[in-house]
Image (spheres, rainbow, N blue to C red):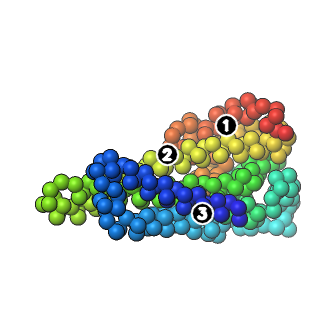
Amino acid sequence: MKRILLFLITNIAVLLTLGIVANVLCVIVSGTTLEQAIGPEYASLAVFAFVYGVIGAFISLLISKPMAKFACGARTIDGSEGPAERWLVETVQDLARRANVRTPEVAIYEGAANAFATGAFRNSALVAVSTDIMAQMSREELRAVLGHEMSHVANGDMVTLTLVQGVLNAFVIFFSRVVAHIVANAGNGERRRSSGGLYVALVFVMQLVLGILASLVVYAFSRRREYAADAGSARLLGTPSPMIAALRRLGNLKPGVLPDSLKAMGIAEGRERTSIWSTHPSLSDRIEALQNLPPMALA
């Protein structure tokens, strides 16, 4: 609940900041305030950016668990299905106790090697693993993978990533329209009268450009949280060795491709090298980070 409150407060603060920054830029570019340049639509635009950008991201977070199950065909288990399922549930329960969070739902889905965590609340999450990763990894390696996913849950990464995405959505919606309006209405009266089509085109272009830049920010944040979740698994298990072994095993397997909405939540993305377009660092970079993990980080 604290993270949800932080989510709303942060985005309201961002909305106010956007207005201040936009006013400064507008004065620099056109010599008028944003309200003078755009008119009464200014307030409506700010509300629209907040509602559509932030609330939309928040709603997607609230329905993330059922959508993830539907997208992957994941089935929830309770441990009564067989020895492998019992071990999986008991391991997640143990890791949840160590991480001081409520045990999440545990699910299995048919597919190539991968695992993910999702959910709007750290005490009401979902951890899912593929049938292939269960078959291909040793229990020690799989326990490390589950520790990685439980670290995402304990850190509230799903909420934080949504907060970042919501802020950037509002930024893209707001500034694409502000810039388009200022540019389309600059110049003489004749140009102003024919600015409707130009405005629409500029909104499209600016949303595309700003959307790409926003995606790079989301990817960079996602990569940081992967390093943190790897380190979190090492802390939960008391040593980085199992996580290192699990990452090396993943390097020898064909990673499962998750739906776009879940890619950032998976254990691996499948890229051999880290790039600005990656939601995950490369496996080699993650292994190196674990090997260089200071002993105090395990305390």
Q: Earlier in the sequence, mark 1 or mark 2?
A: 2
Camera-near label (1 vs 3) is: 3
From the image, tell me which residue sits under label 2: 216
**Separation (CA) of disc 1 from disc 2:** 19 Å
Camera-near label (1 vs 2) is: 2
Classify residue 179 by image quadrant.
bottom left
Camera-near label (2 vs 3) is: 3
The kind of residue tagged 1 is: Arg
Residue 286 badge:
1
The kind of residue tagged 2 is: Leu
Seen at 49% across and 59% down, the residue is: 15
| Contact? badges 1 and 2 (CB < 8 Å) | no
Give the crowd class for mark 2: few <14, some 14-19, many >=20 residues within 10 Å. Answer: some
The kind of residue tagged 3 is: Leu
Q: Which of 181 and 275 is in front in this view?
A: 181
Classify residue 72 by image quadrant.
bottom right
Q: Which of marks 1 and 3 is nearer the N terminus?
A: 3
Q: Is mark 3 on a helix, strand or loop?
A: helix
- Which quarter shows the N terminus? bottom right
The vertical placement of 13 against 287, above or below, is below
Q: What element carries label 1?
A: helix
| Contact? badges 1 and 3 (CB < 8 Å) | no
**Separation (CA) of disc 2 from disc 3:** 23 Å
From the image, tell me which residue sits under label 3: 8
Residue 206: x, y in percent? 35, 53
Q: Which of marks 2 and 3 is nearer the N terminus?
A: 3
Residue 238: x, y in percent? 85, 41
| Contact? badges 2 and 3 (CB < 8 Å) | no
Toward the left, the furthest residue is 190
